[in-house]
Image (tube, rainbow, N blue to C red):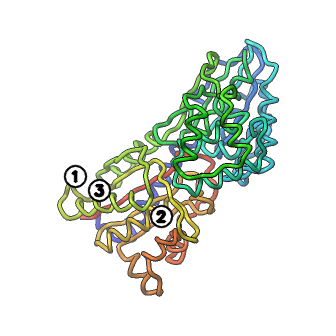
Amino acid sequence: MVWDDGHARAALRSLFDAAVAAADPRKVLAAHLPSRPAGRCIVVGCGKSAAVMAAALEDAWPDVDLQGTVITRYGHSVPTRRIEVIEASHPVPEANSERGARLLLDRVRGLHAGDLVLALISGGGSALCAAPAPGLTLSDKQAINRALLASGANISEMNCVRKHLSAIKGGRLAAAAQPARVLTLAISDVPGDDPAVIASGPTVSDPTSFADARAILARYRIAPPPAVVAHLQRAEHETPSDLPNSEFRLIATPMMALRHVAEIARGLGLTPLVLGDALEGESREMGIVQAGIARSVRAHGEPLAPPAVLLSGGETTVTVRGKGRGGRNVEYLLGKAIEANGTPGIWGLAADTDGVDGAEDIAGGLFAPDSLSRARAMGRDPKAMLDDNDGHSFFEMLGDSIVTGPTKTNVNDFRATLIAP
């Protein structure tokens, strides 16, 4: 195949679509279900995939009396027959986030040892399911959430703080369900697939402490409201460290998606190299590093010969300094495009598998060898736009934004760099 612009763009988009399809709850959830329960089955859940996971459960168990509630992002709901769906805000929680979280707690109270709680958990649950701990208000949690999102903190650090300000995260939902059995089915969107980090681990024992949360706020120079300061001094309110009746199963992960995509790439005549599923760090710096690898492949055939595709997942961070529209995937991609500097034969795509990059209803973007020259012909300075954290505007003006709408799954960021001979 001659890898011209049209073929390269089509291949990259097909690989991204394959990554999303690999994590579709309707395809993967049923294989992870337990035997049908003898007692009551209560369904609770939170995350961008929670509604479609609930619908998949209903399809798999049409003859089981399912009762319960799940919380998902506005626009991510799907029709369900027996399980209630509540929509709430992401990435900053609001009133429905609190109402939904308290309803989940009410759903699991007063159960018995023969009952089963099925928890359907996916990325986004930290904001979507937000019941403040006693003594705190929703506005306290909103203020901390906004500060963390702009700080450059990684997802593990953010969720450590979030769970210690919560009445439901950090294992508190599972604790409220005792003595019932709790089985969590989760889609991972976090580097390392740590159950305690996915949606801040509402059904998982918590290895972190209030001291860890205080240290993170200090590290990023975040000045919390007085009520948060007082709360984080109360060691008696630490999250549960032992939940004997709670089991956790991953049904979709970033690595599962990347392995599937690698097979698709081979079918397209590309040699894949998976750089990792848990890459973290500043978005633009990650872009610079991966552009360097791509240029080595193009010039020297190392670490593999073209035609090739570099694949990676994980969650980078953006330290906000400018006034642009943000987005960690487009920040990574613009940093990579600037470093590639128009090298022939290199294209890149980066997008979030949930369809939302940052706070934008845009999944990400795609760059080509001529992206920088096209932007300059429009009178725009790519480096200045990167410095202003304005990657979304850059790719939008070129017509190279990736827009999917809600995908209703989430295995985090997907990055692919195609290198032609």
Figure quadrant of residue 57: top right
Residue 90 against residue 46 in the figure, above or below:
below
Q: Quadrant of the N terminus?
A: bottom left
Tag 2 or tag 1, which sits nearer the N-term?
1
Mark 1 residue crowding within 10 angstroms, few (<14) / some (14–19) / many (20+): few
Residue drawn at x 63%, y 19% as measured from the top left? 243
Q: Are marks 2 and 3 in contact (CB under 8 Å)?
A: no
> Earlier along the polypeptide chain: callout 3 or callout 1?
1
Q: Is residue 53 above or below residue 35?
A: below
Please identify the quarter of the rendering in which residue 415 is found: bottom left
Mark 1: amino acid: Pro
Nearest to the eye among marks 3 and 1: give it.
1
Decide if residue 25 is in sight here: no
Gap between marks 2 and 3 measured at Cα: 23 Å
Quick check: can you spot residue 416? Answer: yes
| Residue picked out by circle 1 | 303
- Determine whether the residue tagged by mark 3 lies in a helix, strand or loop: strand
Amino acid tagged 2: Glu
Query: SS of the residue at dot 2?
Result: helix
Q: Quadrant of residue 86?
A: top right
Q: CA distance from mark 3 to mark 1?
A: 10 Å
Residue 96, compared with residue 54, is above or below; it is below
Q: Is residue 302 left or right of residue 414?
A: left
- Mark seen at residue 308: 3
Q: Position of residue 110 (x, y in %)?
A: 82, 19
Classify 10 Å Cα crowding around label 3: few (below 14), some (14-19), many (20 and above).
many
